[in-house]
């Protein structure tokens, strides 16, 4: 009897121990499962927080853009860059800043373009003629007597011709985001003339672009490339007999003080391109790229009316301050330049572009 009782007691003890062991294993599994779930949740939350942080940093990243120009602060082209600055800074809530450097502070036009290409400068605004030293076909815009009016200029700049030229610039790491007006250029000299033969043998200052030098050479003059900032002294000392430019550029730098006559040749219309370094552009977010491109187009359109208004105003001011406008036969100058225009267009493979421009007249 006693042995039977002991046996029963041992059996109950074994069963109790087995039951405890089972409960412990289940609790361990539940804890392990719960811990694993918590761990995964923590990792997911951390990843989400990291992504959120990265996006926030990207959206809030401050960007500084330097925009270089060869023109003085008072020029209408600088007003266009200031309009661009206002739009960009407003649309980005001040996150993107634009710092304009006029008057060649960051270098002459060619230096600015080279800096743009290597990515050491973010933006520039440059004459099409100077840009043609890097992308030759862009020079079609600066060929003499290509445009007949402001309306003709705008029709071309809003056409596939402009898109073709933008592709030419993109191929040399320059992205154009807006074509900007300046004005028709005239000849400024110190000798009174009535016919084209009057400029024969004169030394005329021109920009560092082949279209300009070959144009004045087609008139019988010699072309000399003098930095714009040195032109006043060159005219005053007789190093140059004259130059060519728009009414605004003449007045802005006081050049009417050292020349006596304006010859209304209206030979070239200056078109400028608002450029951004392709390298810098590629580093921007798609949202910032869109913002900057739209700002460039809007600023360029703003400049159209401004350029026409300024041109008339400055011609009146020049006349009031004693610069005499000569009466000449412009057709003589145009006909003399046509041989050069046709040969240059053929040399640079831009005959088709020239024909497209003519069709838009």
Image (cartoon, rainbow, N blue to C red):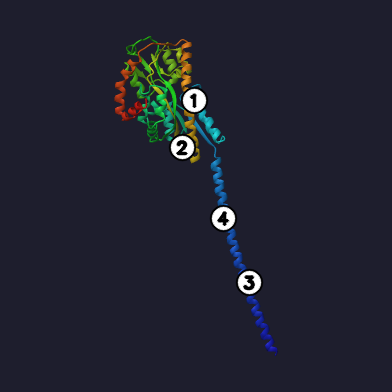
Tell me the quarter of the image containing the N terminus: bottom right
For mark 2, give the secondary structure.
Answer: helix
In the image, 119 versus 49, the foreground residue is: 49
Q: Is residue 240 visible?
A: no
- Asked if residue 33 is positioned above or below residue 262 in the image, the reply reads below
Mark linked to residue 281: 2
Mark linked to residue 275: none
Mark 2 and mark 4 lie on one chain; the one further toward the N terminus is 4
Work out how far the residue at label 3 is from the one at label 1, CA to CA, in angstroms.
83 Å
Q: Are marks 2 and 4 in contact (CB under 8 Å)?
A: no
CA neighbours of label 2 inside 10 A, class few (<14), some (14 to 19), many (20+):
many
Q: Quadrant of residue 357?
A: top left
Q: Do the residues labelled 2 and 1 touch (CB within 8 Å)?
A: no
**Residue 104 appears at what percent x and percent y?**
46, 25
Q: Do the residues labelled 3 and 2 touch (CB within 8 Å)?
A: no
Q: Which residue is drawn at 43% across and 36% down?
A: 278
Number of numbered discs on residues: 4
Work out how far the residue at label 2 is from the one at label 4, CA to CA, in angstroms.
35 Å
Q: Are marks 1 and 4 in contact (CB under 8 Å)?
A: no
For mark 4, give the secondary structure.
Answer: helix
Work out how far the residue at label 2 is from the one at label 1, CA to CA, in angstroms.
21 Å
Mark 3 and mark 1 lie on one chain; the one further toward the N terminus is 3
Mark 4 and mark 3 lie on one chain; the one further toward the N terminus is 3
**Residue 80 appears at what percent x and percent y?**
49, 26
Work out how far the residue at label 1 is from the one at label 4, CA to CA, in angstroms.
53 Å
**Residue 261 appears at what percent x and percent y?**
41, 11
- The residue sitting at the right extreme is 2
Q: Are marks 4 and 3 in contact (CB under 8 Å)?
A: no
Which residue is the site of mark 1? 78
Which residue is the site of mark 3? 23
Which residue is the site of mark 4? 43
């Amino acid at each position: 009897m006693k042995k039977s009782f002991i046996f029963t007691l041992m059996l109950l003890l074994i069963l109790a121990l087995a039951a405890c062991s089972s409960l412990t294993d289940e609790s361990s599994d539940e804890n392990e499962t719960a811990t694993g779930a918590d761990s995964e949740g923590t990792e997911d939350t951390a990843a989400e927080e990291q992504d959120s942080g990265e996006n926030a940093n990207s959206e809030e990243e401050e960007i500084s853009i330097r925009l270089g120009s060869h023109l003085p602060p008072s020029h209408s082209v600088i007003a266009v860059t200031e309009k661009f600055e206002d739009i960009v800074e407003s649309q980005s809530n001040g996150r993107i800043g634009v710092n304009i450097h006029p008057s060649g502070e960051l270098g002459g036009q060619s230096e600015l373009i080279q800096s743009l290409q290597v990515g050491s400068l973010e933006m520039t605004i440059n004459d099409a003629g100077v840009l043609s030293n890097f992308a030759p076909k862009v020079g079609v815009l600066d060929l003499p007597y290509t445009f007949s009016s402001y309306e003709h200029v705008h029709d071309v700049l809003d056409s596939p011709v402009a898109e073709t030229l933008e592709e030419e610039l993109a191929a040399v790491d320059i992205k154009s985001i807006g074509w900007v007006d300046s004005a028709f250029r005239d000849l400024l000299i110190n000798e009174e003339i009535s016919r084209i033969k009057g400029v024969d043998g004169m030394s005329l200052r021109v920009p560092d672009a082949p279209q300009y030098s070959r144009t004045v050479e087609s008139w019988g003059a010699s072309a000399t490339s003098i930095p714009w900032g040195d032109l006043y002294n060159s005219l005053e000392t007789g190093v140059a007999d004259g130059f060519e430019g728009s009414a605004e550029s003449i007045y802005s730098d006081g050049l009417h003080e050292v020349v006596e006559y304006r010859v209304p040749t209206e030979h070239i219309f200056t078109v400028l391109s608002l450029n951004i370094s392709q390298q810098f552009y590629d580093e921007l977010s798609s949202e910032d790229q869109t913002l900057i491109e739209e700002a460039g187009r809007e600023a360029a359109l703003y400049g159209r009316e401004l350029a026409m208004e300024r041109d008339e105003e400055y011609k009146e001011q020049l006349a009031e301050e004693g610069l005499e406008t000569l009466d000449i036969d412009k057709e003589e100058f145009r006909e003399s330049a046509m041989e050069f225009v046709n040969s240059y267009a053929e040399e640079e493979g831009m005959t088709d572009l020239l024909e497209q421009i003519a069709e838009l007249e």
